[in-house]
Image (tube, rainbow, N blue to C red):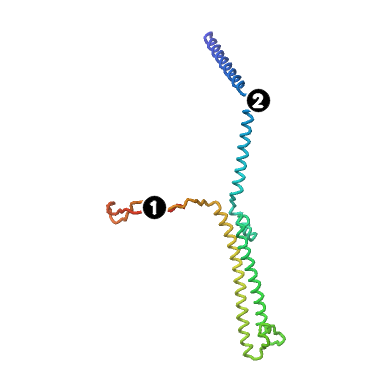
């Protein structure tokens, strides 16, 4: 028991000595720091500048690099004509999109009015009521329909013209739908390609290679020397 007590006492004394040594070293290190805290102020300033620079860099990257969401661009283009182009920040496409819409709407309205006028003229010339003569406004000045031959001729003319303007009106509507569909597809594809990696390194590499013609089992007979071209883009 006495031996064990001596060993415990020795261990405790060694721990006390180590603790005292570390405390002394800590006090010396604390005394070596300047009292005016110049070093601490410079460190804080450097950290503040570094944080501000990092925030500014992130802001510049977010401003210059716009990565749109393809699904959002798709839905905006479906709900609002041209909305996908606005969301993708491709404002130069708006005159093309809205120009296509306005042109198709104008053509559809004009052809529809012509179709109504010629349809009414065709109805008036084929009925037996002499009071319905709206077809006269389509005749030349001083020209009147008096004979059966004239009635037959102009009936055929009015029928062809009303059918023509009806086809053009329907075609204008389908073109309008096509312009709308293209604007939706363009918005979605444009948003998808915004994250496509396009490298500026466009190079053509030409190097010698061994070509196997598979004309013989002997690799020396079926092989020939050639050139291999690789295009990096």
Q: Is residue 216 left or right of residue 110?
A: left
Vertical arrangement, residue 80 with respect to residue 146, above or below? above
Mark toward the viewer: 2 or 1: 2
Whichever of labels 2 and 1 marks the residue nearer the N terminus, that label is 2
From this view, report whether residue 109 is shown above or below residue 62.
Answer: below
The x, y position of residue 218, in whole percent, is 27, 52
Q: At 63% from the left edge and 85% from the top edge, which residue is drawn?
A: 154
**Residue positioned most to the bottom:** 147
Q: CA separation, marks 2 and 1?
A: 67 Å
- In the figure, residue 192 lies in which quadrant? bottom right
Q: Residue 208: percent from the left, percent from the top?
A: 35, 51
What is the number of the mark on residue 36?
A: 2
Vertically, is 198 above or below 167? above
Residue 71 in the image, given as x and y percentages of width and height = 59, 54
The residue that label 1 is drawn on is 206
Q: Residue at x 61, y 70 (%)?
A: 172
The furthest residue to the top: 2
């Amino acid at each position: 028991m006495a031996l064990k007590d001596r060993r415990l006492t020795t261990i405790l004394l060694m721990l006390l000595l180590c603790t005292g040594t570390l405390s002394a070293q800590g006090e010396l290190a604390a005394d070596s720091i300047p009292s005016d805290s110049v070093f601490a102020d410079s460190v804080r300033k450097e950290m503040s500048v570094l944080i501000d620079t990092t925030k500014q860099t992130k802001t510049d990257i977010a401003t210059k690099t716009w990565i749109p969401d393809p699904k959002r661009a798709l839905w905006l283009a479906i709900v609002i004509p041209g909305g996908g182009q606005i969301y993708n920040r491709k404002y130069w496409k708006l005159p093309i999109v809205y120009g296509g819409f306005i042109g198709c709407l104008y053509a559809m309205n004009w052809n529809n009015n012509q179709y109504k006028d010629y349809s009414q003229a065709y109805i008036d010339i084929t009925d037996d009521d002499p009071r319905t003569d709206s077809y006269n406004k389509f005749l030349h000045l001083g020209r009147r329909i008096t004979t059966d031959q004239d009635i037959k001729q102009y009936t055929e003319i009015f029928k062809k013209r009303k059918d023509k303007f009806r086809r053009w009106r329907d075609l204008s509507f389908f073109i309008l739908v096509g312009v709308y569909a293209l604007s939706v597809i363009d918005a979605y594809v444009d948003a998808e390609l915004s994250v496509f990696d396009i490298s500026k390194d466009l190079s053509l590499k030409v190097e010698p290679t061994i070509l196997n013609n598979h004309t013989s089992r002997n690799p020396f007979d079926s092989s020939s020397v050639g050139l291999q071209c690789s295009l990096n883009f």
